[in-house]
Amino acid sequence: MVSFTVRLTFEEGTRESIAATLRLLTEASRQEPGCIHYIPHFVADERATVLLYEQYADETALEYHRESPHFQQYAAGGLYKLRHTRLVEPLLAID
């Protein structure tokens, strides 16, 4: 299993447009084979910060996600161009 968080910061005042894009990305991502969890959050005390929790069955499923048309459109071609910072934190599950 592959799990990680992604923390993105954006310019103040973009919250609604970011939320709209995340809704589209989330809906499509959750339909992917091998996607277990795809959960976007706004950080409560940081109005311009998004935290995504993502979990995939394996590296193949993650690669499928990154190559998908919706990821290319909404993440690589949208959110990533608007972000100020991006931090990925790989996670190890405790069994």
Image (cartoon, grey):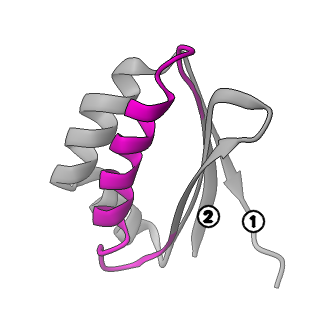
When asked about the image quadrant of residue 47, the answer is top right
Instruction: Give the mark, 1 or 2, whose residue is nearer the N terminus.
Output: 2
Q: Secondary structure at mark 1?
A: loop
The residue stretch that appears in magenta: 8-37
- Quarter of the image with the N terminus in it: bottom right
Q: Position of residue 68 (x, y in %)?
A: 21, 56
Say if the magenta span includes residue 95: no
Tag of residue 64:
none
Whether the residues at callouts 1 and 2 have beta carbons within 8 Å, the answer is yes
In the depicted structure, whether residue 9 falls above or below residue 31:
above
Q: Nearer the viewer, residue 26 or 15?
A: 15
The three-letter code of the residue at mark 1 reads: Leu
Report the amino acid beneath label 2: Ser
**What is the tally of numbered marks visible in this picture?**
2
Q: Which residue is mark 1?
A: 92
Q: Quadrant of residue 77?
A: top left
Alpha-carbon distance for marks 1 and 2? Answer: 7 Å
Please provide percent x and percent y for residue 64.
Answer: 28, 63
The quadrant in which the C terminus is found is: bottom right
Q: Nearer the viewer, residue 29 or 23?
A: 23
For the point 75% across and 65% down, the residue is 92
Q: Residue at x 53, y 21 (%)?
A: 10
**1 to 64, vertically: above or below:** below
Name the residue that disc number 2 marks: 3
From the viewer's perspective, is residue 94 above or below residue 81?
A: below
Query: Residue 17 location, x and y as percent?
Result: 38, 31
Q: Residue furthest bottom?
A: 95
Seen as rendered, the residue at the extreme left is 69
Q: Considering depth in this image, is 31 or 43 the residue closer to the camera? A: 43
